[in-house]
Image (cartoon, rainbow, N blue to C red):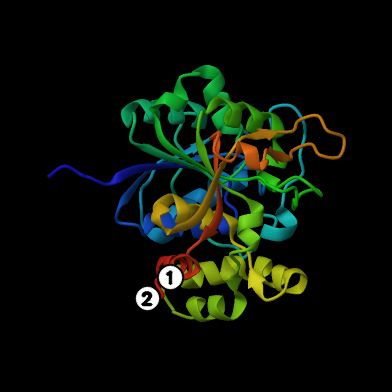
Amino acid sequence: MTDQRIPLLIDTDPGVDDALALLMAFNDPRHEVVGLTIAAGNVGLAHTVANALKICDVVGVDVPVFAGCASPLLHAAVDAAYVHGQDGLGDVGHAPSQRQAESEHAALAILRLSHQYAGQLLLVALGPLTNLAVALKLDPGLPSRIGRLVVMGGAVTGHGNMTAHAEFNIGFDPEAAHIVLSAFPHFELVDWEATISHGLPHGEVLQWLAAGSPRAKFFDAISRKTREWSADRRGDDWYAADALAMAHALEPEGALDVARRVLVVETEGRHTRGATVVDWRVEQSDAGGNASILLRYDRPRFQRRVQAALAAT
């Protein structure tokens, strides 16, 4: 019988919320994860690669992991270890994997898999877009072979989290984001502002993590530092940006409101470098655009998917 599952390639920088998104992807029967391509971002590349391998071990899958770019294309950037822990997974000392990353560079793996699954591949980008930018410079024809590109990044009305106007994934490597988002004629965007409006209540998250499954125990441990940091600074909800992006990627029918607009990345502004600038003018609303921006997603559906990924149901 032919496998009818949708091939899913995830470009990521694990990361606590990346870990939750990966648990969701591995838990979805409609999709087959065909590879993880890894960039620096939340923490350095050695940690993000190691974390991807650890997550595969926890789930018990043998998905190939490809190490990619260790730094942004042009300028140095700060990481987010203060949120995710120095190792990116809460500094809990989780045992390293016995597996190794593949020898193939992430950018080359993206290109190869785009040919192997031409027209079918769901590409979900959860971190800085450096690997995709390098792949595009090697082969500008990449977008024609991607079935869907879903990007977690940006702040579409300028309410950033890395700077006043820039979200972390885009702000970490604005040049890469510019290359990617201007090359794809269409992509789906789940931004930081959507994340804020789809927070996960801390009390319910604690109930899900008490399920006692190996995945819940793992995620409870690695997320404790960032959840406590969030509770101190952000109130009643915990924000899981990559999880929301993954929910939309896996189950786009859960989207309740999407706006199609023109989006560009600012690379030069003194105060706005890394900002995602969207043309919100009413007269442009029927003119199409390169970005389908998620504004509202079915919250109960999102929460059920997170809960299931933690093996709490």
> Callout 2: helix, strand or loop?
loop
Task: Confirm or deny contact between disc 1 and disc 2 (CB under 8 A).
Answer: yes
Quarter of the image where one finds residue 311: bottom left
Q: Is residue 293 visible?
A: yes
Q: Is residue 12 above or below residue 91?
A: above
Q: At label 2, which amino acid type do we have?
A: Thr
Residue 250: x and y in percent read 40, 52
Residue at left 83%, top 33%?
Answer: 269
Placement of the C terminus among the 4 image quadrants: bottom left
* Residue 103 versus residue 41 in the image, above or below: above
Image position of 92 with respect to 143: above or below: below
Say which of 52 and 277 sits in front: 277
Q: Which residue is mark 1?
A: 304
Apparent side of residue 283 relative to residue 125 in the rendered image (left or right): right
Label 2 sits on residue: 313
Q: Residue furthest left?
A: 1
Indicate which label's residue lies in the foreground, 1 or 2: 1
Q: Position of residue 199 (x, y in %)?
A: 60, 67
Task: Identify the image quadrant of residue 39.
Answer: top right
